[in-house]
Image (cartoon, grey):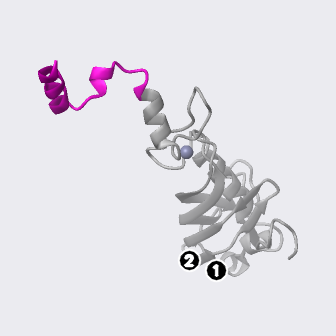
């Protein structure tokens, strides 16, 4: 500890030993819970705040098939208002780790120690998930084109600013408009 960044879990935790499953015949499977409740270093440019779910590992003739859903939390910047937020989403995973390695069957493979590394797969899946516009909330108001302020925080000022461009009468409650007419 002591660094400004704080502690994080080592990416070693994203490696799964599957040698025992390879030794069993095709058709055998194993359920593997994934529970990383803290910040984890996935690859050089990617940290995830948490990772949780369940993976089913199935021995096939080609290697180990991994299927399941992982709940991911990723600290990032909103594409609309630029605020930092926790992007939480589910990743559906269905990927073959070939054994022996075979580029024609999968870019992923079981290594010579009988291990699979989830990190490159996670990186790819997170990049795909976040290649679309990712916003902090469905109704994020973004930044004011005029002032650059974050409209999520500056709601009242924004309304006042918008109101000043309107016709005065349009901004008045219709019931009050009737009174105004009477006063003339
Ligand atoms: Zn936002």
Query: Depth check: 54 or 58 in front?
Result: 54
Q: Is residue 60 above or below residue 150?
A: below
Question: Quick one: SS at disc 1?
Answer: loop
**Residue 45, numbered circle:** none
Residue 76 image point, x, y percent: 66, 52
User: With 77 as the anchor, is 53 left or right in this view?
Assistant: left
* Coordinates of residue 138 in the picture (x, y in percent): 44, 46
The segment highlighted magenta reads 163-184
Which residue is nearer to you in this view: 156 or 118? 156
Q: Give the residue drawn at x 55%, y 65%.
A: 70
Q: Which mark is residue 24?
A: 1
Secondary structure at badge 2 equals loop
Residue underneath mark 2: 28
Q: Is residue 174 magenta?
A: yes
Task: Answer whether labels 2 and 1 touch (C-beta < 8 Å).
Answer: yes
Asked whether 14 or 30 is in front, the reply is 14
Does residue 65 lie above or below 80 as drawn?
below
> Toward the viewer: 169 or 92?
169
Quadrant position of residue 144: top right
What residue sits 11% from the left and 22% below the top? 182
Placement of the N terminus among the 4 image quadrants: bottom right
């Amino acid at each position: 500890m002591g660094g400004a960044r704080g502690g994080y879990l080592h990416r070693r935790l994203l490696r799964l030993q599957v040698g025992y499953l390879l030794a069993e015949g095709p058709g055998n499977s194993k359920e593997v819970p994934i529970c990383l409740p803290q910040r984890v270093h996935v690859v050089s440019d990617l940290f995830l705040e948490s990772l949780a779910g369940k993976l089913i590992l199935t021995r096939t003739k080609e290697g180990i098939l991994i299927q399941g859903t992982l709940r991911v939390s990723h600290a990032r910047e909103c594409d609309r208002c630029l605020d930092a937020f926790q992007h939480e989403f589910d990743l559906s995973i269905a990927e073959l780790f070939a054994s022996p390695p075979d580029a024609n069957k999968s870019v992923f493979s079981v290594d010579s120690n009988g291990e699979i590394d989830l990190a490159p797969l996670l990186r790819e899946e997170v990049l795909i998930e976040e290649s679309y516009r990712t916003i902090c909330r469905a109704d994020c108001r973004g930044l004011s084109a005029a002032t650059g302020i974050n409209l999520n925080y500056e709601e009242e000022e924004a309304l006042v600013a918008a109101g000043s461009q309107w016709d005065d009468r349009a901004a008045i409650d219709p019931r009050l408009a009737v009174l105004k007419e009477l006063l003339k």
